[in-house]
Every structure is written in structure tokens, then in C-alpha cells.
Image (cartoon, grey):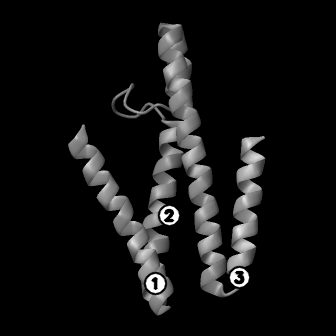
Amino acid sequence: MLCFVFVFARADAHRYNRLYTAAQKDRALTYFFFFLFYSMHVGWCVWAALSPPIGTQWALTGVMTMAEAFGEKAVLGIFYLLGFILWSVEALLSLFCLQNTYKVFRGKASNEEIKNNLARAVIQNAV
């Protein structure tokens, strides 16, 4: 388990390192790679939140397998519901990050505007 955490934490840090380098040197190609890989990340989060039963049935905790899990046991369904909620939140936060990064890339947002939008989103999610 610790090995997986270490590998995924390093991969996640590498993704944001690429974004930091792109912002520091203002290179379009580095931004392109960030957008490409981060879009694949968002696609994976949406796929995991939906989790169509292709291949193995119980592999991902999404909404489609959640319906079947509630048919098996209520506790199992609750765990699948929790997984669906977490994948959905991850997908929404990733889209928010992608949107703000694109605004910065195009020069349409300042740092103050991004901070205000982030604070507003955190307050709305908390309520």
C-alpha cells in the first residue's frame, strides 16, 4: 500500500512540476503537455465515477456498479456511493484547476482573480 502511495504521489508531483515549469518559463509546449496529461486525468476520473461494467464488474466504485452493489448488500452500496462521490469531487476539482490554468495560459486571469475564485469555490463547497 505504501508503495502505491509513493508512486502516485510522485506522479502527481511530476504533473504539477510540469505546470510550474511551464508557468516559470512561459513555454506553450510545456503547457500543451500539461493540458494533455491533465485532460487524460480528468477523463479517467469521469470514467471511474461512471464505472461502466466493462471487463471486471467490481473494479471501480462508480454509479453504475453502485446500483448493483446496493442489490448485493447495503454496506457495500454505501462504500460504492462514497467512492462515486470522491471520484466526482476529484473530477470537478480537476476541471476547475484545468479551467484556471487555461485562463492563466491565455493571460485572461490575474493571480488575485484566481485567489478570489478559489476562495469563493471553497466557501460554496463548504456550505
**Mark 2 residue type:** Ser
Which percent across, then down, holds residue 116? 76, 67
Q: Residues within 10 Å of mark 1 (few under 14, many from 20)?
A: some
- At 54% from the left edge and 18% from the top edge, which residue is drawn? 78
- Asked which secondary structure carries label 2, the reply is helix
**Mark 3 residue type:** Ser
Image height check: is 116 above or below 103? above
Dividing the image into 4 quarters, which one contains the C terminus? top right
Image height check: is 101 above or below 92? below
- Asked which secondary structure carries label 3, the reply is loop
Task: Say if mark 1 contacts mark 2, CB within 8 Å.
Answer: no
Q: Which is more toward the observer, 74 or 51?
A: 74
Dividing the image into 4 quarters, which one contains the N terminus? top left
**Mark 1 residue type:** Ala
- At 45% from the left edge and 92% from the top edge, which residue is drawn? 25
Question: Going from the N terminus, do you reach mark 3 or mark 1 first?
Answer: 1
Q: Label 1: which residue?
A: 22
- At 30% from the left edge and 59% from the top edge, which residue is drawn? 10
